[in-house]
Amino acid sequence: MNPHLSAPCSNDIDSDSIRRAAVAGWLIIGLFFGGLGLWSTIAPLNGAVVTNGMVKVEGNRKSVQHLDGGIVKDLRVKEGDHVNVGDVLIVLDDTQAKAEFQVLSEQYVVLRATEVRLLTELANAGEMTIPADLANRGDDSYARSIWTGQIKQFESRRAAIDGQRKVIGEKIHQLQSQIEGAEAQVRAYNEQIQSVRSEADSVAPLVDKMLLPRPRLLQLQRTAYSLDGQAADAQANIAKFRQAIAEQELQIAQLGNDHMADITKDLREIQAKLVEVLPKLANAEAVLSRMEIRAPYAGRVVGLSVFSIGGVIQRGEKILDIVPDEDSLTVEVQVAVDEISDVHPGMKAEVHLTAYKQRIVPTIRGEVLQVSADRLTDPKTNSPYYVASVRPDVTELASLPGIRLYPGMPATVMIPTESRTAFDYIVGPLTQSFSRAFRQK
């Protein structure tokens, strides 16, 4: 074989091999980038806002204060105790409060019973009816004695006024009897006058004929005139007696008017005092009811400031705090300002309690409760942020034995957002940049 002919053939073979390898390489590269491009346009990537936060009490811990203050009589809780709504935490000495309530309560009973008596007298009723507020004090001996006393006073006052009316009535009866006697006298005088005048009429002709002396006629005439005067006096007495009866009847009416005026005046004074006593009594009752300081929330006692019986609690002083139960605990996270558009209430979230090992506590589902209406600024770093509250699923927490939420516990929260492709992640910023660039003046 000619060596000069074999060399070109060998070079052609090497060139073809290199060409095929290059084509294969470019084909592989094309397939890789083509597949990568296809994947970037159709394969969804789940986005999420990942941020760190801290477990906090929803609305923070609840402080327990006392409006009035007082001396501790009994201390029924200690630091860390769990309490339910309405549980007695502290009992205060109620000596002064009870005394004030008792005084005002007795004043109210007296005023209320007196008011009922006066209203009964004003209505001219025959008997007093005990009102419900006094009837409910059936086991109160003081209230019973006051009510009994008012009944006796009602009866005695009614008997007194009836007695005065009876005395006046008897006077009227006597005057009526005197009128009847005077009227009888008038009738008798009139009959005598008629008789004397008849006799005078009979004697007058005889006197004219000189058969009887004239003094006889004059005597009869004088007798008639005298009887007329006596009859007139009797008539005057009748008028005087009738005037006296009218005066007595007016006195009866005036007696009733004066009695009603006195009742009205007394009733007005009593009701004015009741208006003053009622709010004081209600306040004293409220103060007495606050002698037992009860838990307004369910949770755990922290920050107890009273430690011994006999200690003094000042008015309005914070006594302790109650950290509400787990169903009131949320995870508060800081959301970056450029991610706030992806976070809104109602979104699902995943909470990881970093204080526990991941193998012990899996990721817990949660929900975004609220997002702050305005951004805040970290005073240390001056970085702006928004606050979001995430509530872990209570059911999932309950299914994890030995796992509890405590205020201040760190946590990591992932809030899934909308799915986008890798192409969107790459092209999106470029598109926005071009859009802003072409809009610039």
Image: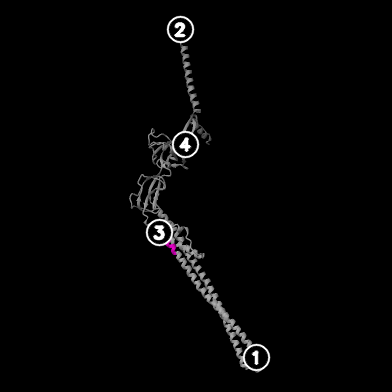
Could you tell me which secondary element the residue under label 1 belongs to? helix
Q: Are marks 4 and 2 in contact (CB under 8 Å)?
A: no
Asked if the residue at tag 1 contacts the one at tag 4, i.e. Cβ–Cβ closer than 8 Å, the answer is no
User: Dot 3 corresponds to which residue?
Assistant: 102
Name the disc covering residue 348, or none: 4
Sequence-wise first label, 3 or 1: 3
Q: Quadrant of residue 288?
A: bottom left
Is residue 263 in view? yes
> What whole-number distance in Å separates the C-alpha atoms at marks 2 and 1?
219 Å
Distance Cα–Cα, label 3 vs label 4: 59 Å
Measuring 50% from the left and 26% from the top, which residue is drawn there? 38
157 versus 422 height, above or below: below
Q: Earlier in the sequence, mark 3 or mark 2?
A: 2
Which residue ends up furthest to the top in the rendered image?
Answer: 1
Q: Where does the magenta region start and end? A: 140-149
Q: CA distance from mark 3 to mark 2?
A: 136 Å
Residue kind at label 3, given as amino acid type: Gln
Residue flagged by tag 4: what amino acid is it?
Lys
Instruction: Measure the C-alpha gap from mark 4 to mark 2.
Output: 79 Å
Q: Main SS of the magenta segment?
A: helix
Closer to the observer: label 3 or label 1? Answer: 1
Q: Assign the N terminus to one quadrant of the image.
A: top left
Three-letter residue code for mark 2? His
Quick one: label 3, few (<14), some, or many (20+) residues within 10 Å? some
Q: Position of residue 94 (x, y in %)?
A: 37, 55
Q: Which residue is mark 1?
A: 204
- Residue bearing mark 2: 4
Q: Which circle marks residue 131 in the picture?
A: none
Secondary element type, mark 4: strand
